[in-house]
Image (tube, rainbow, N blue to C red):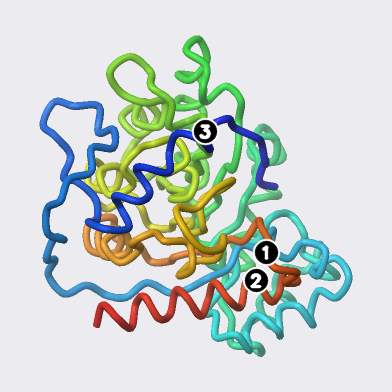
Amino acid sequence: MTKRSVMPFAPVWAALAMTLMLTGCAEPQSGSSQSAQPTATAETAYPAFEKPGISVQLWSVKDEVKADFVGTLQALADMGFDGVEFAGDFGPYQNNPTGLKAKLAELGLAVSGAHVGFDALRGDKLVATALFHQQLGTPYVIVPWDERAFAADTVDLVAKELTVIAERLAPYGLRVGYHNHAQEMADYGDITFWQYIASNTPESVVLQQDVGWTLVAEKDPVAMVKAYPGRTLTTHFKAPEYETPKGAPIVGQDGINWLPIYQATAAVGGAKWVVLEQEQYPNGLTPLEAVAASKQGFDSIITAGN
């Protein structure tokens, strides 16, 4: 399950966010740490790309999932989502992955991935986890959090463990990945912890960038995608935490220019799935209402780019 934490970045990232809103993202500088350096350049034109599916991280509606698992999935399907990303709660299907796969198919949903901690991917537990997700049809098993990933004396252990797990999951047709929070985007020498992990794992390890957290950490999400082409197969889009340059913490109402981020993620990152995540519910909206608002905002952004 995704770890949520409080970071003291709110007062300092708004200028970056505003610049992204107005201009798009900068190109990474050769030899640089790929940190955010937004400029007033035109948005990049990319060749035609296959549009990724649109999923939702079920942590966004975790209480609703717990109260009414199937009803919540139906509500998300009715919003037009193509898939869902699991976060440890499989409702009445906890031990029935084939039954869950059938139910999702009935609702017109696919599995875009699942957040799975390292503890379920070690030793004998890995086989049970792999079999469950193989039968469910999960393409990506994403590690959502590990404190070793943003400590100088342990980040290498995370990279090594991801490498081993990638090899062990391959026979099951599964790929492992890692998901960032703001901490992994902190500087580590002349790069970031995120870049260290990316550079010290095989290309089969998926880099699930959480764009909201990348912006909170004052890093450029487009530069992070371009630094590792073809590895952002799944990504999280959400209104950044704590503050937005204007408006509400809802995608499309947050003042962020999402279109160039989306285009780079799909065209260069090779994204198969964009996963919307909602962790703030402004103006009295319920979690489902807030998710629906972000889905509508995201749809309008993509439509505007066509």
Q: How far apart are marks 3 and 2 (CA)?
A: 24 Å
State the SS at label 3: loop
Lower sequence index among marks 3 and 1 = 3
| Residue 50 appears left or right of 218 | left
For label 2, the crowd category at 10 Å Cα-Cα, with few meaning under 14, some 14 to 19 and many 20 or more, is many
Q: Nearer the viewer, mark 2 or mark 1?
A: 1
Report if residue 173 is visible in the image: no
- Where does the C terminus fall, quadrant-wise? bottom left
Residue at the farthest front position: 246
Lower sequence index among marks 2 and 1 = 1
Identify the mark at residue 290; answer none if there is no mark: 2
State the SS at label 2: helix
Near-viewer residue (30 or 166): 30
The residue pinned by badge 3 equals: 9
Image position, residue 292 (x, y; %): 61, 78
The residue type indicated by label 1 comes to Pro
The residue type indicated by label 3 comes to Phe
Identify the mark at residue 185; answer none if there is no mark: none
Contact (Cβ within 8 Å) of mark 2 with mark 1: yes
Decide: is 261 above or below 37: below
Image position, residue 117 (x, y; %): 66, 40
Identify the mark at residue 282; answer none if there is no mark: 1
